[in-house]
Amino acid sequence: MGDTTQSTCDVCGTGFEVRFRYQVREEQGAYVYVCSTKCQRSLLLGGEGEATCCAVCSTPVEVEYPYQVAVKDGVRAYFCSLEHRQAWTPPSAAPTPAGREPRRIAVFNHKGGTGKTTTSVNLAAAIAETGRKVLLVDADGQGNVGASLGIRGEKTLYHVLVNGLAVEEAVVPVRPNLDVLTSNEMLAAAELYLAQRPNRDRILRERMGDRTRAWDVVVIDCAPALSLMNQNALVFADGVVVPVACDYLSLVGVRQVLRTLQNVQRHLQHDVELLGVLPTFYDVRNNISRDALTSLQKNFGERCFLPIRVNTKLREAPSAKQTIFEYAPDSHGALDYLKLVERVMPSAARPAPTAEVDAPAVVQRFGRPAMSA
């Protein structure tokens, strides 16, 4: 698995290091640990002894593998084969526990150098300033979120995805109302783990979906890549902010982002909303910046946010391990990100459904911006 986690066996109480996937099992919304195959079998049987029958065909079952057991509302069901496990219809789901789903926002662009991490950190910090509880998730193995805030989590997103560690046990509280789930180079190994899973595009959602209700908003900083991790982030998110640097190559890259969102909706059957594109590194003195902003406004209308102006303080803040609101609260950068929160968070400020961006149409017409002479 590439890493170990010290745990206690839930069957015999022995301390051990998690080294194999069978040693961690999700059951009734929590993770349980076993130190050996003997304890695994005892756990799977749930203290019911050896006499078990298939819930589909009623034949006797000798339980050896996790897929042969399902637990729903405290009731165990056993299966003689994977086919019967897949054909089984579980009992009706119990009422959802108290607490509403958080708003989940992915900051995403395939291209690097567009200000994704700067946007993720300062968007999360600005939302936290409004009194909402925010979880900032670093889904980029470069670990730039932690570097920007001067933190290094003992446990990371890798441990949540691969070892089944509870989210609340991995997060690092960094500011009032702001917690961070960090990442590092081990996230590359997590991608290999995801690739071997049946629902490989939904593992992040499965691991974190019901376990993020302690927060009002989850902001995910995505890597600049076409990757399985980014697919997981987009399936987990319900909205996407796309930072776009005010230069020609970044404008061209927006088309690929739109195609990716369209594929997530069409092939992965997940409705993720384009909240808007965010022009970054905007310099009113340059023709390319003005033309890029005009092009984005023409193609995206209300879904083109006000630009983030070129600001030295935004570049300096990470070196001081601070957000822009701590480093230079009166700067243009702080003001611009506060305006972004006003657009992203209040439901009344979001474009009406009738203003939905037609991704295929935008892809078709979004081309080279007109350049001033």
Image: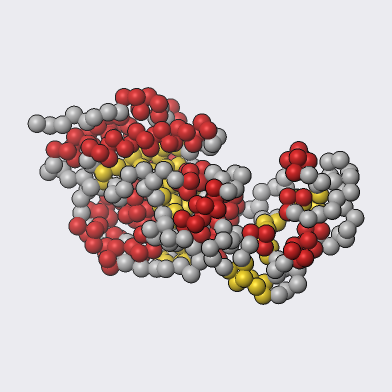
Coloring scheme of the render? secondary structure
**Vertical position of residue 71 compared to residue 8: above or below:** above
Would you say residue 209 is visible in this rendering? no
The residue at 20%/50% (across/down) is 310
Residue 296 in percent (x, y) is at 27, 34
The residue at 63%/62% (across/down) is 20
- Return the residue nearer the eye: 35 or 325: 35
**Quadrant location of the C terminus in the rendered image:** top left
Residue 266 in percent (x, y) is at 51, 31
The residue at 41%/66% (across/down) is 175
Would you say residue 184 is visible in this rendering? yes
The residue at 41%/50% (across/down) is 222
Residue 173 in percent (x, y) is at 46, 67
Q: Quadrant of residue 139?
A: bottom left
Residue 245 in percent (x, y) is at 26, 44
Horizontally, residue 228 falls left or right of residue 28, namely left
